[in-house]
Image (cartoon, helix red, strand yellow):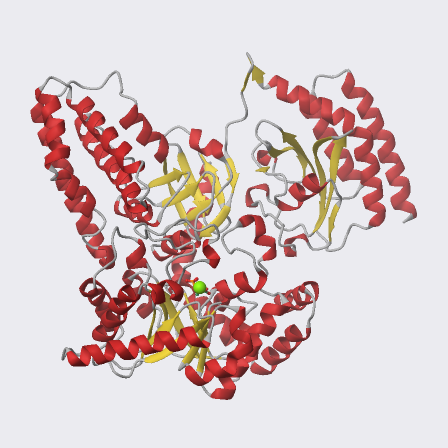
Amino acid sequence: MQEKDSSYLNLLFHISELADLVTGSSDLEDFLQLSVDLVAQHFNAPVCSIYLYNKKLTRLTLKATKGLKPEAVNKIRMKPGEGLVGQSFETLSIVREGNATQNPRFKYFAEAGEDPFHSFLCVPIKWGDEKIGVLAVQHRDMDHFDISDERAIKAVVTQVAGSIKNAGLLIELAHTKGGKTVSAPLAFVKGKAATRGYAMGNAVILNQQQKTLLYAPDPAEPVCSKDDFLTAIKKTTRELKALQKTFVRRLPESASLIFTAHFMILSDKNFMGKMEMLIDAGTPPCDAVRKVATQYIGIFSSSPHAYMKEKAQDVEDLSIRILNKLTARQEDRGYEKGNIAIATQVYPSDILKFVSGGIKGIILASGGVTSHVTILARSLQLPLIITEEPELLTLPENTKILMDGEQGNVYINPEKETIALFETRLTTEKQTRSVSMKHQTHTLDNERVTLLANINLLSEMSLARRLKAEGIGLYRSEFPFLIRATFPTEAEQYRIYKKLFDEMPDHPITIRTLDAGGEKTLAYGDGPRETNPELGLRSIRFSLKYKDIFEFQIRAILRAAAGKKQVRIMFPLISSIDEFLEAKQIVRDCMACLSEEQLEFNRDAALGMMVELPSVLETLDEFAREADFFSIGTNDFIQYMLAADRSNKMVADHYIPHHPAVNRGIGKIVAAAVIHGIDVSVCGEMAHEDAYIPFLLGLGIRSLSVDPQFLPRVQQTIMTLNMADTREYAGKMLSQTSVKGARAVLESWKRG
Ligand code: PEP
Ligand code: MG
């Protein structure tokens, strides 16, 4: 300690000298660099960095570093509140972490080379009331910094804050020419990985392109004739038919649905006739398309009905396709093979259009997505990163982008070395994916665990089969409903479910009935807007209100399952015994009708329920007597237990899977199922998390249902466990009364 203190005095002396120096110096970047070098040296810390806040960009930017990669300077940016640095800045408090990587707020910047540093000490830099930035020191050892470091570094920061403020201002000025800020080109953006995987391609800024082509004519547009117009229409029709074919292969449930509206508009005499009339009267074809399209878009988008509003998008999409042909543009709304879409808002139907156009990955420049857009993207193996970086929308079209959906990193014009690194990772990943799975899964001490797959799209069935899923634990039947413009008929649903049963004839198949509403809004659902949709008319409530829709679905399932064994139907978001009994009665009524109609159907389907609501906890025994099985939907269970919206990033810190109430709730559900001898599985995201699998097994769960791509990892995890350890771990988790205590138990398991 003695040694530390004298070294700190030394540091204060040098820094004050430095502060004097900078007032007469113009070498500002050097001043910051010297400061971090000096602090790092005196604190015996391998890393010291200064982040300054840029008001225009509303971001903290790494401005100088000793120890991190120099090329990360000016590239690493974060929002106030983001990561430990952002937290320190926002709350104006010192953040000291002995093992930073374990802090859920920790943001990992691979490109900074910060992997091996555990200890983290951040001190906010402020001048008077003004927040200026953050100084951070890092050390390889855990728990390296103590309270004396905190005090010393605070003293240093107080001394240099004024100079740093000046330096920051002058640096900004130096980058401002003629009143216009010339900020360093955007090279890297840290976002949140919504779906995993890597993708590389050329940027296509969707919203921008639509506007320019449809709403702002290009002065250099070619002069076209009526014949050109008619050819463009033919080409567009051909192109849409070809896209449709791709769909049939990749997304059987949406076959012939996605472009129905396009074809209808193309054959609509009013729409096409108006364009032809204008052209005959001398209007240039491009202008005629624009005029009629914008008229229709205006009418549709002013409709109070959601499904009519969606038509506006279809007209827009179709018109842009026609204009592309007329202006001989090579690209088709930019959906060229290999492109990375950058957008502000995405709907489930957009995802399908992206896929049909060969988009490789999606980056959201701002705004959030519903968790079902995420689930859909994941099913289609489309990397999706959500950022808060509107600057991405200003990138020139065709800018090279590398997406690292593992870390949530977006590299703009990546360097050769970065690309090479990702190519190696991709190869290794492909090799691991080809790992052969065992048919059955056992723990080290030979306890059998059944691994099932969660399926959102029929196209995922082949992966599930290849990865030896022992059945389907959750088929989210809402996707065929979500991706189209009207309710699917009984016949359409029958075809989808039949395919599902036929793909895995000898395995249990669990179909969940429509889980619409909430964030899974149907475009054609025409009810009034709900102020609080997560607590609104959703899921089984929707089905029980619109019984005809529910009955069509039940009939389609029962008919498609004729002659099949191990058919399971489950109802989502059950909140009371009454609801469950009502849903069961509807199944019986449907069976009676099918019998009368002399149609073939399945009479033995097991009827179970998703356990997702805390209200169920008090009547579990009664539920267990009525239900053939329980499936625990942890995604919603956590959301409703903790009143923390699962898609709202503002409350992400409150969505705590290891919360004692969640742990004990799950414990009670499993215990009730075991006592009553009914099957119980977990199909929420928790089922594929390394640290929760042993907890669930320890509670008595023997069946997990996960997205197919997680199956190999989950199997490997289970194979390393032994039951005595999992029981002890589950017992410890259940005995915790605080979030902090539960987190400590979880962390100690992770550390092994
Ligand atoms: C859940 O809530 O855990 C679940 C599996 O259902 P979904 O994610 O579709 O709401
Ligand atoms: Mg759910």
Which quadrant, please, contains the C terminus? bottom right
Residue 375 vs residue 156, the one in the foreground:
375
Left or right? Give the position of 419 relative to 57: left
Residue 542 vs residue 49, the one in the foreground:
542
Which residue is painted at 32% across and 45% down in the image? Answer: 306
Which residue is painted at 82% across and 21% down in the image? Answer: 20
Q: Quadrant of residue 599?
A: bottom left
Which residue is painted at 26% across and 52% down in the image? Answer: 484
Q: Outermost residue, top direction?
A: 178
- Check the image and report above or below for 414 versus 487: above
Left or right? Give the position of 376 relative to 616: left
Left or right? Give the position of 475 relative to 68: left
Left or right? Give the position of 235 relative to 730: left
Q: Quadrant of residue 708?
A: bottom left
Which residue is painted at 74% across and 34% down in the image? Answer: 125
Where in the figure is residue 313, as x and y percent of width and height?
A: 28, 39
Q: Quadrant of residue 58?
A: top right
Q: Does the rendering let one see residue 218?
A: yes
